[in-house]
């Protein structure tokens, strides 16, 4: 199904897309090439979001982090759905460079983050918080979406 042509999809459908994507990454990178901690808590079947919102953030974590870590990569994805909020925390390893403050995510992650920010602006106006930043050898993304609707 082509979710990108819809205004909103069920969060459970987005999670299924993410699971499929991670399975493909395991094939591409090899089963032992990264460590994954993927947790989903809360009810996801009655919540809708713009398609590919969370997926894009996770794809960025692989593209700019895990794929460049040469079998030492790790990624943590914690998604919590509360009564009126979606909380997402993504942390992934990035290769360290000799120049402080530089990492692979500094140069290329901006396009994906900005695309997600535009989706969120249209759907939630000011009802969300998105922060993406490098912290040493880790790239951190925090997303809070408030006033979610079914």
Image: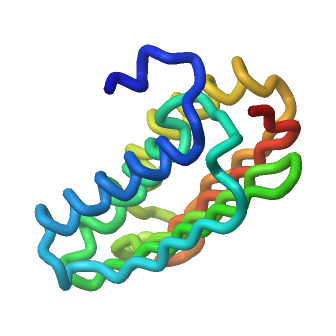
- Quadrant the C terminus occupies: top right
The quadrant holding residue 96 is bottom left
Which color scheme did the rendering employ for the protein? Answer: rainbow
Q: Is residue 54 left or right of residue 5?
A: right
Judge whether residue 14 can be spotted in this image: yes
Residue 34 in the image: above or below residue 82: below
The quadrant holding residue 46 is top right
Q: Is residue 2 left or right of residue 30?
A: right
Judge whether residue 100 can be spotted in this image: no
Q: Residue at x 87, y 37 (%)?
A: 147
Residue 56 in the image: above or below residue 5: below
Q: Residue at x 12, y 74 (%)?
A: 30
Location of residue 140 in the rendering, given as x and y in whole percent from the top left corner: 59, 64
In this orientation, which residue lies closer to the viewer: 130 or 14?
14
Location of residue 6 in the rendering, given as x and y in whole percent from the top left corner: 50, 17
- Quadrant the N terminus occupies: top left
Q: Is residue 139 left or right of residue 23?
A: right
Number of numbered markers: 0
In this orientation, which residue lies closer to the viewer: 141 or 14?
14
Location of residue 91 in the rendering, given as x and y in whole percent from the top left corner: 54, 70
Q: Residue at x 19, y 84 (%)?
A: 32
Q: Is residue 82 left or right of residue 33?
A: right
Q: Residue at x 26, y 74 (%)?
A: 69
In this orientation, which residue lies closer to the viewer: 87 or 90?
87
Location of residue 72 in the rendering, given as x and y in whole percent from the top left corner: 27, 84
In this orientation, which residue lies closer to the viewer: 70 or 150?
150
């Amino acid at each position: 199904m082509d979710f990108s042509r819809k205004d909103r999809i069920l969060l459970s459908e987005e999670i299924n897309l993410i699971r499929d994507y991670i399975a493909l990454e395991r094939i591409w990178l090899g089963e032992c090439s990264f460590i994954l901690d993927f947790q989903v808590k809360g009810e996801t079947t009655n919540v809708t979001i713009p398609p590919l919102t969370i997926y894009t953030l996770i794809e960025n974590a692989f593209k700019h982090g895990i794929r460049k870590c040469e079998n030492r990569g790790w990624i943590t994805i914690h998604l919590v759905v509360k009564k009126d909020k979606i909380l997402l925390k993504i942390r992934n390893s990035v290769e360290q460079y000799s120049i402080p403050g530089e990492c692979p995510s500094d140069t290329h992650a901006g396009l994906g983050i900005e695309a997600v920010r535009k989706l969120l602006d249209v759907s939630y106006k000011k009802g969300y918080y998105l922060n993406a930043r490098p912290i040493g050898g880790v790239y951190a993304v925090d997303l809070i979406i408030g006033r979610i609707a079914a």
